[in-house]
Amino acid sequence: MLETRGGNKVNRCAFISPSEIQATICESNGEGVLSYIADAMRFHKDKRFFVAPYWQGVVARLKEDIDTTHPMKWTLVECNQQPSSWECNFYVMRWMFEFVLTRQNEFPNKNNWNDKKPFMNLVLNEIIIMWSSRFESEYLSQVPL
């Protein structure tokens, strides 16, 4: 992500795969989810922040076990909420991108996320164009026709 903006900044973020911490997996294999989180934290021990979309589902189901094995400060931010379901991943991508690029160095001292209003369509279109252009140039250009 930092490369996208010519980032010569220090990245203090690691990412937790949302596919590994889904609510259904927490319910069926809580031990496996805890193991995955512990492994990710050990591997990225130099990172200060773990960005995890859908983390609130893990917190609700496994918080006590995680706090016991890997104490951490939980900071769940309140940010823009999508009005329906199709926009969800665009919102997640936007906030992860913004956190890594502009907010990680001041967080949590300056937590200026407090707007729960949905994004305007113009903002959603910008997100779609940015990520689809990046995907096309990085991945689709390498696919033989």
Image (spheres, rainbow, N blue to C red):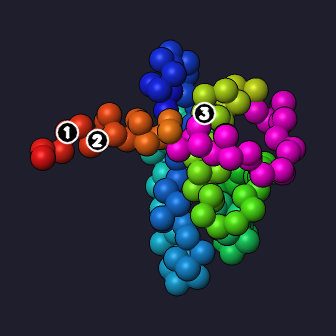
Q: Is residue 50 visible?
A: no
Which residue is drawn at the image coordinates 84% and 35% (left, top)? 112
Dot 3 or dot 1, earlier in sequence: 3
Q: Quick one: label 3, few (<14), some, or many (20+) residues within 10 Å?
A: many
At label 3, which amino acid type do we have?
Answer: Val
Tell me where residue 131 appears, x and y as whole percent: 47, 40
Disc 3 + disc 1, Cβ < 8 Å: no
Identify the residue position indicated by label 3 in the image.
100
Q: Return the residue nearer the eye: 12 or 114.
A: 114
Q: Which mark is residue 139?
A: 2
Position in image of residue 143 (x %, y %)? 18, 44
Q: Residue at x 70, y 54 (%)?
A: 71
Q: Are marks 2 and 3 in contact (CB under 8 Å)?
A: no
Q: Amino acid at mark 1?
A: Gln
Residue 106 position in % (x across, y down): 76, 26
* Residues at marks 2 and 3, CA–CA distance in whole angstroms: 22 Å
Q: Which residue is mark 1?
A: 142
From which residue to which does the magenta span run? 107-128
